[in-house]
Image (cartoon, grey):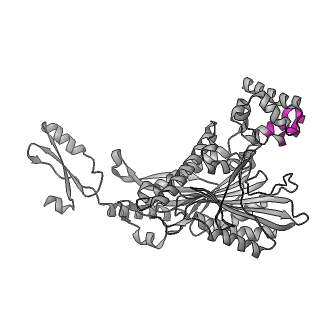
Amino acid sequence: DAMAAVGMDRVRQYEFLDEATAAATAAAAPPPVMGGVAMTIAFGDELGPAIAVDPPGVRAARMQEEVQRRRSSTTPPPPPTLVQPASADIPSGRSPVTTVLSVRPMWSQEESSAGSANDRGELEYQCLSWGPKEVVLHTEATGLGGRPLASIATKRCAADAVYGPEDDQLPQAVAAALVSDCTSPGSESSEVAPVLCEAGAVAVMYGQTGSGKTHTAKRIQHDLVVEVFRRPGVGAVRLAYWELQAGGAVDLLDGRREVRLRDRAGRVTADARTEVAATADELQALVNIGVEHRSLRETQVHDQSSRSHALCVFEVLSASDASVPVFRVVVLDLAGAERGVETHHHDRDALAETRFINSSLSVLQTCVRCLRVGKRVPYRDSKLTMVLRDVLEGTSRVVWVSHLSPMASSAQHTRQTMQFVRSLREVSRAVPGKRPPIRWNRSEVQDWVKRLEDGKYAHLARWMEWADGATIKHEWRIDFVQRLAASGVAEDEAGFVFDAFHELLKAK
């Protein structure tokens, strides 16, 4: 009867031989780990008082009320502005990474379930608050063994800009930032291929599945079509649209034809079809074709979830010479990770997709951590990181848009995304001069070659785009010299650069 009075359906009973120990334990006993469990402390046959905990629904309602109170007590943030980080924060030889956090709106089913618990026992409430340059995650504090505590734990994440559910200017701001920063006319490269190149800009959509990445990517692509043709001197745009999936790469402009990935001087490209558009309407029609061929699948989180990493590559051609690309802009829509509990209803093909997505995103996180601490970066552990190498090494102008879901049931994904953003910001502000030469990326090696002997060997930099510090460190001298000699470089010059780098290694 006592159990029924407090709504408990299970009892945990502990018996002690010592009455004093039983009394002390009863006084200090923590609440149960899960709702619906009563804990009793017994000495002999005498039961002590039941210690109850609120059921999940009550706790979720209390959390929802407390987070709403905290949000309403703060001054509403002004509209965000997407600006490049201050030049003082960006070391020379690197392009900046602008980090953006985007909080998607609540779905109708989430609004109706806020303040309750889902079928997995997870609390459902809106757990995020934000300001112009910061997002705060509010979660239920837990003790040892996951025991819920009567307090709220907070986790903060800073960014260059934060866009809430009501801020619809994000796609236009990203498109304008990408196009305005792509000012590389007269590029020596005449190769036209869907590649993330040094003379270009990249927008990356990152976050868990169902957080709004593909929706944002579509709107950015639409605004890019408009922005590109507003620029003076633009004659046409060459478009490539392809995606990475578990089985390899497919061309979205050619009926999902399988294409090969090629590694050219350390850059990964796909042999994908390209189409040229002379007007904004023609370009938008081509983009729509690619969007229609995206790999989508219903998941437990979303009924139209993207299950591949898609790259939409805009190559802007000069009006005076259509064979010369003026600059490139890439919109990369990364597929979202899924937890094990979110894959119970997947078939074999869906599980293969999830394994590919989760493993490639895990390698991406590992690469960012290695860049942050100066360790060897395992780019070749995943096709995704091979494609993203120029992005991570700072040779492209990057706007990294991380998407967050507002509900507490996604708090684990939100924590991981916030931690990734923090690591990414540390990498983009890492000072190359404080790292040993063996940890230099390709951009830093080229900067060093250009400064070597007061610029005497600057002309060699263009032939060393493949070389980072670790590559030169582990390369045999004769192989290094022959590789540069095959490009027309004098052997004595190549040998001098090799020896100078190894002398630098010894000095460090």
Q: How many marks?
A: 0
Q: Position of residue 93 (x, y in %)?
A: 77, 43
Q: Write down the quadrant of residue 113 in the picture.
A: bottom left
Was residue 314 drawn as part of the magenta stretch in this picture?
no
Residue 183 relative to residue 355: left or right: right
In screen coordinates, is 54 left or right of 258? Answer: left
Q: Is residue 334 above or below residue 472?
A: below
Residue located at (49% from left, 70% from top): 107
Q: Position of residue 294 (x, y in %)?
A: 61, 66
- Asked if residue 337 shows in the view, the reply is no
Q: Position of residue 181 (x, y in %)?
A: 78, 58
Quarter occupied by residue 221: bottom right
Identify which residue, 254 or 492, lies in the foreground.
254
Viewer-closest of 336 and 94: 336
Name the residue rendered at 16%, 41% in the picture.
Answer: 22
Q: Residue furthest bottom?
A: 281
**Within the magenta stretch, is there residue 460?**
yes
Magenta span of residues: 446-462
Residue closest to the eye, 227 or 367: 367
* Horizontal side, residue 409 vs residue 258: left or right: left
- Of all residues shown, which one is farthest toward the left? 45
Residue in the image at 21% along x and 41% along y:
25
Quarter of the image containing the N terminus?
bottom left
Q: Does residue 473 appear anywhere in the picture?
A: yes
Q: Position of residue 262 (x, y in %)?
A: 71, 50
Q: Is residue 108 left or right of residue 268?
A: left
Instruction: Assign the magenta stretch its main secondary structure.
Output: helix
The quadrant in which the C terminus is found is: top right
The relative height of residue 65 versus residue 440 in the rendered view (above or below) is below
